[in-house]
Image (tube, rainbow, N blue to C red):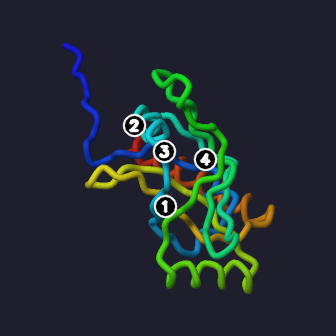
Amino acid sequence: MVQVRKADPNNRTVAENRKARFNYEILDTLETGLVLTGTEVKSLRGGHANIQDSYASNEGGEIWLINSYLPEYLQANRFNHEPRRRRKLLVNKREMAKLSQAVDREGMTMVPLKIYFNDQGRAKLLLGVARGKKLHDKRQTEKERDWSREKGRLLKERG
């Protein structure tokens, strides 16, 4: 008989930026809130979002998520949202000062890593403060990943 797996209620990840961990060296992470409209929340609950090419920027004392894609909610008609609009991130002043200081002074960038729902059912964004990797660093990461896969295969064959 086929066993059906239920969705894990603790893992409510909607979108993950897997390419960010390859292209950037993540130095620090921060959980931020998102300012969303009703149809955006419904679209997220449906599991539709893309943050692959998005980034965060500090403009006018506020942090904005730019170029993220939340598709329109199909059941909403004329009151739908714009899929690629800028979304405000909710961060307290101390964290905002720390982020903007790191980005301005040290030449880092703010990269969205994951959108998920927390235990209270609120949409959260995991924001990473990152430094771009050089080509040789990316190659080294790929070598380490390949070696760990090969090591796992060898151990599986022997044991």
**Residue projecting furthest to the front:** 78
Q: Which residue corresponds to the image point at 58% horizontal and 84% vertical from the top-left?
A: 97
Quarter of the image for the C terminus: give it.
top left
Q: Quadrant of residue 60?
A: bottom right
Real-space CA distance between mark 1 and mark 3, rounded to the nearest whole angstrom: 19 Å
Real-space CA distance between mark 4 and mark 2, rounded to the nearest whole angstrom: 15 Å
Task: Indicate the position of residue 140 as horizontal and vertical percent values.
Answer: 70, 62
**Residue projecting furthest to the left:** 1
Q: What residue is disc 3 on? A: 37
**Label number found at residue 45:** 2
Mark count: 4
Quarter of the image for the N terminus: give it.
top left
Q: Nearer the viewer, residue 89 or 154?
A: 89
Q: Nearer the viewer, residue 83 or 103?
A: 83
Horizontal side of 87 relative to 118 (left or right) equals right
Q: What residue is disc 4 on? A: 51
> Is disc 3 surrounded by few (<14), some (14 to 19) or many (20+) residues within 10 Å?
few
Q: Give the amino acid at mark 3.
A: Thr
Secondary-structure class at tag 2: helix
Q: Give the amino acid at mark 1.
A: Leu
Q: Nearer the viewer, residue 42 or 142?
A: 42
User: Of the residues under marks 4 and 2, which one precedes in the sequence?
Assistant: 2
Depth-wise, is mark 2 or mark 1 nearer the camera?
Answer: 2
Q: What residue is disc 1 on? A: 126
User: Of the residues under marks 1 and 3, which one precedes in the sequence?
Assistant: 3
User: Marks 1 and 4: CB-CB under 8 Å?
Assistant: no
User: Of the residues under marks 1 and 4, which one precedes in the sequence?
Assistant: 4
Q: Which residue corresponds to the image point at 53% horizontal and 31% vertical from the top-left?
A: 79
Depth-wise, is mark 4 or mark 2 nearer the camera?
Answer: 2
User: Marks 4 and 2: CB-CB under 8 Å?
Assistant: no
> Is disc 2 surrounded by few (<14), some (14 to 19) or many (20+) residues within 10 Å?
some
Q: Nearer the viewer, residue 6 or 44?
A: 44
